[in-house]
Image: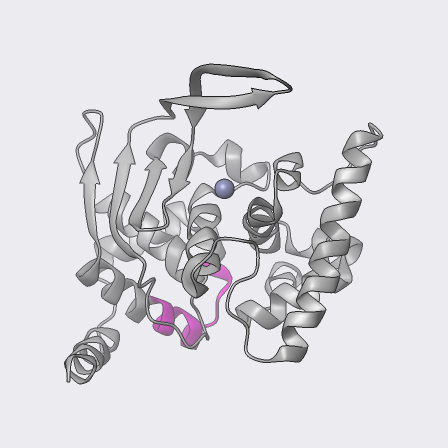
Amino acid sequence: MFDLFKNHRRAELRKQGLAESERAIVSRHVPELARLDAAERGELEGLVRVFLAEKSFEGCGGLELTEEIQVTIAAEACLLLLHRDNDMYPGVDVILVYPAAYWVESKTHDGAVVIEGPEARLGESWARGLVVLAWDHVSSRLMRAGGHNVVLHEFAHQLDGENGSMDGTPPLTTGARYSSWGRVLGQEFTELSERLHAGKPNDIDAYGATNPAEFFAVVTEMFFERAAAMKARHPELYAELAAFYHQDPAARETG
Ligand SMILES: [Zn+2]
């Protein structure tokens, strides 16, 4: 019964577009959306309405939440849901937004030594209910120019976790899809790790070699922000992501 109400409410929200002030924010902060066609933009606007109605935002570290912050984050997060059968990030209830990269206590193991100390974070995805973002990095044109997008990164982790574990494999539709995903992403992950160890240059961000979950989040950023380059240099990886996201952002970049 709850699903019926939820689906009805979502269908109503999805019919509503964005207000002019919200459209202006999106065109300023989310350049990817300018490349969508009219039907896709309409679909995306409906998703953003649902996102804004269902998720709550909290400003942290003195940050005052604005429409600009909420609409920008919602629009980027919803870009990952376009054309996909989705349940609007069921694992996310709250998005915490800090003004800038924030410091957390962390423990790292370096051989036998445990190094404890503060570590700068740009964003985090928690398995239960929470995404944490630093607004200066969300809105940074410099990050974007470097092919980074912290919102896409953190929400890719959420998609990854929808089957119960953030392990680099989000829910896929068929057994065949799982085997090609495992083969292609596994090979690319291994190649990235090997190139790093050998001191060779690589075009996939080194952070992706941390583990398969980070690899999926990093290549999601690259898929949307450097699509044509990824398609040219990593065609199989691009094809896996294109099948998962039901999008071909390289065609948008060149078209
Ligand atoms: Zn990550």
x and y percentages locating residue 58 in the rendered image: 19, 40
Question: Which residue shows up at 59% across the image and 42% down it?
Answer: 147
Q: Vertical placement of 139 versus 225: above or below? A: above
Q: In the rendered view of the protein, which quadrant contains the N terminus?
A: bottom left
Stretch of the chain drawn in magenta: 33-44
Q: Nearer the viewer, residue 39 or 219?
A: 219
Q: Is residue 36 magenta?
A: yes
Q: How far from the left and from the top, in percent, is residue 5?
A: 14, 81
The total of numbered circles placed on residues is 0
Q: Quadrant of the C terminus?
A: bottom right
Residue 150 place in picture, x, y as percent: 46, 41
129 lies left or right of 37: left
Is residue 66 visible in this depiction of the protein?
Answer: no
Q: State the image quarter where residue 161 is shown.
A: bottom left
Residue found 29% across the figure and 28% down from its top: 99
Q: Is residue 133 above or below residue 89?
A: above
Would residue 112 be seen by someone viewing this image from the given angle?
yes
Q: Residue at x 32, y 66 (%)?
A: 88
Task: Answer left or right for 1 relative to 152.
Answer: left
Q: Residue at x 61, y 17 (%)?
A: 112
* The image quarter in which residue 146 lies: top right
Q: Position of residue 197 (x, y in %)?
A: 79, 30
> Is 238 left or right of 216, judged from the image as shown?
right
